[in-house]
Image: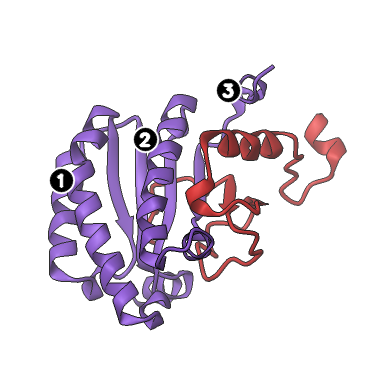
Amino acid sequence: MCLNDLPDPELLIRTSGECRLSNFMLWQIAYSELYFTNKLWPDFKKEDLHEAIIDYQNRERRFGQVSEQLKS
Amino acid sequence: MSLVDQINRSKCPEHIAIIMDGNGRWAQQHGEVRLFGHSSGVEAVREVLKACVDLGVRYLTLYAFSTENWNRPKEEVDGLMNLMVETIANEVSELNDNNIRLRSIGDSSRLPVDCNIELNKAKEETKENDALDLILALNYSARWEITNATKK
């Protein structure tokens, strides 16, 4: 892949209310958290980024495991 | 408590990817041509970049132009390419001020010559920066990337 030295994105954001991946980083987002917002891109402010990150931080990322395994 | 204070700084994503959609619709809502929406989108990129640096996000990948976007009206494609060239050329000092390194992914062979010139120049001039890597996906698609990878 093009970005072998980079970690996969933990968070993928798409603006404008469309819920598609549109051929973007399909390999790297295997375990990414997806966040869709209705905000149109020119209206996307730092507060919107903060909201997306807070939403991401409240999710449980299991990577195929079960909750109990993550807690141990 | 403000939004930013609710963020757990030790658990910020290291890499955020964004599909920046809605420039055209935004322009339409404001009674402007689509290209005006794209140039307004550049301001959002600046703001998000700064916010990412402030939070310690290490990599930001932006979907700027897909391999399918060539199918848009020629006027929009040409305008987008010009905007890209101008923006990249104008932002280098800002990138350096914020310790941001510019990189790109995608098939650059089909990009206009002046776009590649500015892009390579900006990459070269920012290559020592290490606060954040800004990765522009230009003439990019995942299927192109994966197909390309299998050829190597």
Q: Amino acid at mark 2?
A: Leu
Label 1 secondary element: helix
Mark 1–mark 3 distance (CA, rounded to whole Å) = 31 Å
Mark 2–mark 3 distance (CA, rounded to whole Å) = 16 Å
Q: Which residue is mark 2?
A: B132
Q: Is residue B39 left or right of residue B111?
A: right
User: Residue B93: image x %, image y %?
Assistant: 18, 35
Colour chain B appears in: purple
Q: Earlier in the sequence, mark 2 or mark 1?
A: 1
Q: Which residue is mark 3?
A: B9
User: Residue B11: image x %, image y %?
Assistant: 61, 28
With respect to residue B33, does B70 lie above or below?
below
Check the residue under mark 3 and report the chain it is in.
B
Label 2 secondary element: strand
Q: Residues within 10 Å of mark 2 (few under 14, many from 20)?
A: many
Residue drawn at point x = 37 percent, y = 40 percent: B46
